[in-house]
Image (cartoon, helix red, strand yellow):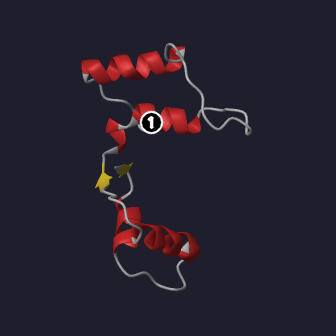
Amino acid sequence: MCYTDSQTVLDLISKSYNSYQYHVAVIASIQDMLKLDWDVTFSHSKREDSFSADFLAKHDTPNDVELSFSESPLEELEIILLFNVLRVLHPRA
């Protein structure tokens, strides 16, 4: 499963693209990978529903760290997760 909050990205990947499109090489690579023998499903999710993923994507980590585990979430992430459980809306950044 691959989730994105950009419908534009989903459209670029799933439809033919203009060869003058800025990210044509990346789009072509993704489309080539989709032809491999595996199941990939793309799904559009609202940005408001993915604040925790957005936080983790923007969180600073050393460049040499490939994978890390944590016993508990970072303090800032705990608040985001609590808001998700309580269904509190987050302001757009």
| Residue occupying image coordinates x 37% and y 37% | 50
Using residue 76 as the reference point, say whether residue 50 is left or right of it.
left
Secondary structure at badge 1 equals: helix
Q: Position of residue 70 (x, y in %)?
A: 54, 18
Using residue 80 as the reference point, say whether residue 89 is left or right of it.
left
Q: Position of residue 91 (x, y in %)?
A: 39, 33
Pick the front one: 50 or 71: 71
Q: Residues within 10 Å of mark 1 (few under 14, many from 20)?
A: few
Q: From what the image shows, is residue 54 above or below residue 13?
A: above
Residue bearing mark 1 = 53
| Residue occupying image coordinates x 48% and y 67% | 30
User: Residue 27: in sight, yes or no?
Assistant: yes
Pick the front one: 52 or 89: 52
Q: Position of residue 85 (x, y in %)?
A: 28, 20
* Image quadrant where residue 74 sits: top right
Q: Position of residue 52 (x, y in %)?
A: 43, 31
Q: What amino acid type should be assigned to the residue bearing mark 1?
A: Ala
Pick the front one: 36 or 69: 36
Using residue 22 as the reference point, say whether residue 77 is left or right of it.
left
Q: From what the image shows, is residue 47 above or below residue 68?
A: below
| Residue occupying image coordinates x 31% and y 29% | 89
